[in-house]
């Protein structure tokens, strides 16, 4: 039987380090089963006048779709990382279905619901109008959505439900030793509003107001992004610069060394701002587990039981995080699993390998692609 041919299509997504890592992991998993090719569709630079014209409801972001068409040959499926549903984007998907009727069009919705997250700023409203006008057309040009929510159907299209996954073979396990008198918490991210790290910084302020603290707690925030200046301002305002350290974006060995100095990692604490009140599939949470670190989060994580000892779950709202609770939960964890960091790290990493390997989380998608079109769904 001929090996199925597929294309992974995205729209300038590799500008983000985190997204680029995810694309690499997904491509490796898909390439193990199918003949894969990646097609980035770049935006065409515009002057100010054309940018203004592009804000109108029926205008589209000019992209190099013609270059993509030159690369697509007899596809059995395409895996598309969603972008704003403007006219040209939806037309591209419709043409795919028209030219290759048996091609399975699979669109990944990496956050759902996404309206409040993507379009909350006033200057994004013109794109929200485009989205509302066009996304109903998914029903005629998409065969499946991939979602990390619990939704079985989105915009009239059947959804494949999964979680984010990690390639544990490519993630170095955290090493080092615990300190008797201090705990270090690390947050690594492109600092955006959904990370909500102001809740942690305010929690540190309240923690150090107490007279009899059991341990010194330090916060290490790694990465740049639009919220970084806000976090730095809060740290200065609360006189926490001795306990909150900021780093620019780092990768590789330098980042591994920062993780080795940490005891607890952070996922996101601001999903409520995007209207996400139930479980999410934060890639960062699974990466923390693969590093062998327990993590704190402000929203439940898909696939992880809320009583999981490696996850310190806090309310999904703007409340200040009680750092004393973080300290207590961490102390209880190392008392239960042993005070040696490497011992606990191996336990946590095995949990990640068992539940969130890329092979496991991509299996529902691979099964759908591998199924013949005439087979029942």
Image (tube, rainbow, N blue to C red):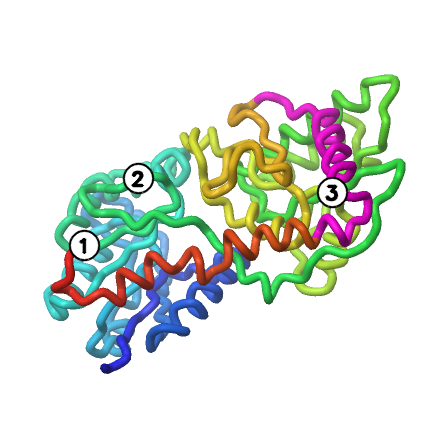
Query: Is residue 57 shown left or right of residue 181?
Result: left
How far apart are the alpha carbons under marks 1 and 3? 44 Å
What label does residue 377 carry, if any? 1
* SS for callout 1: loop
Q: Earlier in the sequence, mark 2 or mark 1?
A: 2
**Residue extent of the magenta highlight:** 319-345
Inspect this view and state whether residue 281 appears.
yes
Camera-side mark, 1 or 3: 3
- Residue 232 in the image, given as x and y percentages of width and height: 70, 37
In magenta stretch: residue 184:
no
Crowding near the residue tagged with mark 3, few <14, some 14–19, many ≥20 C-alpha atoms within 10 Å: some
Relative to 66, is 251 above or below? above
Camera-side mark, 3 or 2: 3
Q: Which residue is disc 2 drawn over?
A: 151
Relative to 199, is 27 above or below? below
The quadrant of the image that shows the C terminus is bottom left
Crowding near the residue tagged with mark 2, few <14, some 14–19, many ≥20 C-alpha atoms within 10 Å: some
* SS for callout 3: helix
The residue drawn where x is 63% and y is 30% is: 198
How far apart are the alpha carbons under marks 3 and 2? 36 Å
- Residue 204 in the image, given as x and y percentages of width and height: 74, 28
């Amino acid at each position: 039987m001929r090996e199925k041919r597929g294309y992974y299509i995205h729209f300038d997504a590799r500008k983000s380090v985190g997204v680029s890592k995810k694309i690499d992991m997904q491509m490796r998993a898909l390439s193990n089963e199918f003949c894969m090719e990646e097609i980035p569709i770049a935006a065409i630079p515009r002057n100010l006048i054309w940018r203004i014209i592009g804000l109108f409801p029926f205008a589209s972001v000019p992209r190099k779709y013609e270059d993509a068409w030159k690369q697509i040959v007899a596809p059995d499926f395409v895996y598309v990382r969603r972008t704003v549903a403007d006219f040209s984007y939806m037309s591209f998907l419709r043409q795919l279905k028209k030219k290759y009727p048996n091609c399975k069009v699979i669109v990944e919705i990496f956050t759902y619901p996404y309206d409040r997250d993507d379009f909350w700023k006033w200057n994004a409203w013109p794109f929200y109008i485009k989205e509302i006008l066009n996304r109903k057309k998914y029903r005629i040009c998409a065969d499946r959505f991939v979602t990390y929510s619990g939704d079985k159907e989105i915009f009239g299209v059947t959804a494949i439900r999964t979680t984010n996954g990690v390639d544990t073979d490519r993630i170095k396990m955290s090493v080092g030793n615990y300190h008797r008198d201090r705990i270090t918490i690390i947050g690594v991210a492109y600092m955006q509003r959904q990370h909500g790290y102001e809740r942690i910084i305010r929690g540190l302020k309240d923690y150090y107001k107490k007279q009899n603290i059991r341990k010194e707690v330090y916060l290490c925030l790694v990465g740049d992004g639009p919220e970084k200046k806000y976090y730095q301002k809060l740290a200065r305002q609360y006189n926490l610069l001795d306990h909150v350290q900021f780093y620019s974006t780092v990768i590789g060995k330098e980042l591994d060394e920062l993780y080795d100095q940490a005891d607890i990692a952070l996922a996101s604490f601001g999903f409520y701002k995007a209207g996400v009140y139930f479980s999410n599939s934060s890639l960062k949470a699974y990466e923390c587990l693969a590093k062998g670190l327990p993590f704190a989060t402000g929203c439940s994580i898909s696939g992880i039981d809320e009583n999981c000892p490696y996850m310190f779950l806090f309310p999904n709202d703007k409340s200040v995080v009680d750092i004393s609770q973080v300290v207590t939960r961490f102390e209880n964890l190392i008392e239960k699993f042993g005070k040696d960091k490497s011992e606990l790290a191996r336990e946590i990493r095995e949990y990640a390998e068992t539940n969130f390997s890329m092979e496991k989380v991509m299996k529902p998608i691979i099964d759908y692609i591998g199924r013949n079109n005439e087979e029942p769904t």
